[in-house]
Structures are given as C-alpha cells and as structure tokens.
Image: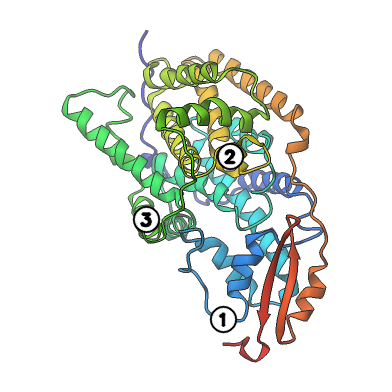
Amino acid sequence: MESPKMPPPAHTTTPQNSWITRERIAFFLIILVAMAYKSNDALSNPQFWAEDATIFFKEQFGTSLPQFFTPYAGYLHFVPRLVAWIASWLSATKAPLIYNASAILLATAAIVVTCSRMKSYVPVWIVALSFLAVPGSGEILGNITNAQWFLQFALAALCLTPMQVACGWMVWMRPLAALAMALTGPFSIVLALIIASILATAYLLRRIKLDPFNGALGEFAATRDWAALTATCFGAIVQAAFVITHPPVKGEGQDGLFPLLKITFGELVPIHTFGSSFLTATAWLLLFAVIIGTLVFSKRIEGRSRLIVLGFVAFAAAETFAPVRLKEVAPLYQFMLADRYFYLVKVVLWWAAWLSMSGGSRRSRWNASVATTALLCLVAVTNQQYLRRPAFVDFDWRSHAKQLETPGSYTVPLNPQGWGVIIDSKASESDQ
C-alpha cells in the first residue's frame, strides 16, 4: 500500500489576517467554563492552596520586588512568582481570588494552545476531552502552585509541532511565553533533551538516507520555530543550573532501574489513568509496547503525526519516571497522592491510543475517534468523584488578611487541611 504523502510544511501556511477569531474565542470560553467547573469553588470561595501561601504569597508579602529567581524545590517557578508579584499590587484580601483566577486562565490558555497546535494530528475534541475527562485528585486545579502541569503541554506543543507563521504581536509573544514557561518547571530540561535527541536522530538517519516517518524526521529541523525553541533551551539551561546546585533528595530503599520501570508503567500509570488497574503489569506493558510499536513502524499512519505524538510520549514517560525514581514508591499507589506526576502521561496516552487506531483512511480515523471518545467517557463516568477538585474549607482569609495590616506574626490555616503558614507583617516596611 502506498504510504500517505506528507502535508506541506506548516511554515509555508499563509497567516490569517487576525489570530483572534470567533471560533477561537468560543472554544476558549467553553474550556474556561469547564476548567472553572472542575476547579469547584476556587472562584466562589477563594482560599489559598498549600504553597500558594507558604511559598509564593509569604515570600512576596512585604516587598515590592518580584522574587522571580528565588528557587523552590530546587527549581524556578517564574509564572507563579509573576502572579504573586502582580497580586501584591492590590489588597491582600484579594490575593487568593487573583491566584485562583490566574491559575484557571493559565490552564485554559495552555489547553487551547495545545489543541490548536495538535489539531492537524489528533482531533481537537479528543485532545480537549483527554484534558477534561481523565480522573485526577484535583490538586492541580485552581492554584498557581500546580499551573506548571498544564503549561508544560503548551510548551511541548510549541516545540514539537511545526512552526506556524506569526504576525503582529505573536512574533515576539511566542518566544517570551516559551521562556516564561521554561522557567516555571524542570520539565523544560526534559523537553530540551527530547528535542536534542530528535535532532540528533534526524541527522544520523539522514546520513544513511533512512526516515521511518515518511520524511517528517528529515525536515524536523527545517520546520522548527527556532525563536521559541531557543527561548525554551535557554530556560532549560537556567533551570538545570538551579537543579544541579539544589539537587533533590532521593528516597531511600529504591528498587533497581528495570523493576522501577515495571512498577511505574505497569502499575502506577494504569492506577492514575483509569482510577484502578484491571490488568497485570505485564499485560499493561505489552499493550503500551503495541501502541508505541504501531506509532514507530506503521506506514499507514501519517509520518509527522506519529513523530509528534511519539515526542509527547517520550516527554511524558521521562517526566513520569523521574519523580518515581526519586521518591518513595509506596505512597504513589494511592490515587489521591502525587497524582500531578501522572497527569501528562495519562493525557498523552489517549492521543497515542487514537493515533495507533487511526490508520490511513477516513473510515479508520472515524472509528478511532468513536472508540477513543467512548473509552474516555467510560473512564470519566466510572470516576465521577475524581473529575472535580474537592471543595475547600473556608478559613475566612479576609479576616486573616486584615490582621496582616498590623505588625506582628500571624498563623494562617490553609487547604488542604493540616497545612498552615506563619506570616510576619512589618507594616512600616511594606513599601520596601
């Protein structure tokens, strides 16, 4: 059977007169409403979540200078620091609302950008549904601490998909946004290594005139948005410098490499993706191997789509395995604990599943879309309790914020329950 022809490179596409269209506004609003709903009472009962207060609010409170380059957990959090700095311009009583609203807007923007960049390779509704319908603990919803788990998708989409012609403010906004996201989490280091590996593989295979992706690998370098990619790599280098100088503490009693790989992808990933594991670890590994093997070797599937989704798969696998390698494994079996580490892989898994079933015909793509949508809906229905963030306890932040107007040391209770923060207020130095 003749291999499907490669579509023309994205960088040859004629730019539209306006990047903002009615369709994009409508889609953005739909995702915004969905994310606000999933975040439960983040806007109606705005409360601080964990590090939103203990790190970002506390370290910004009382100073007018932004804390962009103050690391936490061994790396930089540029975007949360930016939100905290902007929120400090207003009354402290408004801080939780600003933090939560910003988190919802950031997550929405990341999903919309990812859907836009991936629409030529995976149907938009499959990408959107994979974000909205997968079960989760809710810890990444409605707080700026965990906004990075959404931003990583947008950054990866900018780097892994071909360049799209930009005009006007998008010319400079795209690399600036890439830099901001790269400075917001260590995932930029992993992504930079993935991109470097693809470029190196493309160079080596070009030397022997081999391209298993129907020409997509050979033209990978020529179709990159090098401004955004350079910004991403610069941010990754900065993050790497902080990670090296602030190394994470490795958990004790870790298993060997191969047992950990089996635990991660044969046991932990299914639990966090489907809410439970209904196959053996070996069966899951074989299923994942079939999906990946299909994406690597199937000539019936368009080459560029396979390469992009495989790039996301590699990114997700590396990011998921890294924290498992560093932390105690036993708590990770509990769905409500550390679920954020599995969000990327359980979203990308559905893209890979759809593409592996899509084949090369319109009929097979339709069948793949129906099957993937049905399975996603089934997972959502059987895990309804994990589709929204649990409601927060109202600790009456306004009264605590009023106290901060008077010099002193104050203990503030936080969500999740059991958390708290001690904030020192020095009114005479608040303008320093």
Which residue is painted at 82% across and 74% down in the image? 399
The image position of residue 371, as x and y in percent, is 63, 18
* First-in-chain label (2 vs 1): 1
Cβ–Cβ under 8 Å for marks 2 and 3? no
**Disc marking residue 343:** 2
The image position of residue 405, as x and y in percent, is 74, 84
Q: Which residue is mark 1?
A: 64
Please tell me whether mark 1 sits on a helix, a strand or a loop: loop
The image position of residue 120, as x and y in percent, is 49, 32
Crowdedness near tag 3: few (<14), some (14–19) or many (≥20) residues, C-alpha within 10 Å: many
Which residue is painted at 67% across and 36% down in the image? 335
Q: Name which quarter of the figure residue 244 lies in.
A: bottom left
Q: Which amino acid is tagged 3?
A: Ala
Position above or below: 327 against 119: below
Q: Which amino acid is tagged 2?
A: Tyr
Q: Which residue is mark 3?
A: 240
Quadrant of the image containing the N terminus: top left
Residue 226 in the figure: left or right of residue 332: left
Quadrant of the image containing the C terminus: bottom right
Residue 90 in the figure: left or right of residue 246: right
Q: Marks 1 and 3, how far apart in space? A: 28 Å
Residue 25 in the figure: left or right of residue 17: right
Q: Marks 2 and 3, how far apart in space? A: 22 Å
263 or 56, nearer to the observer: 263
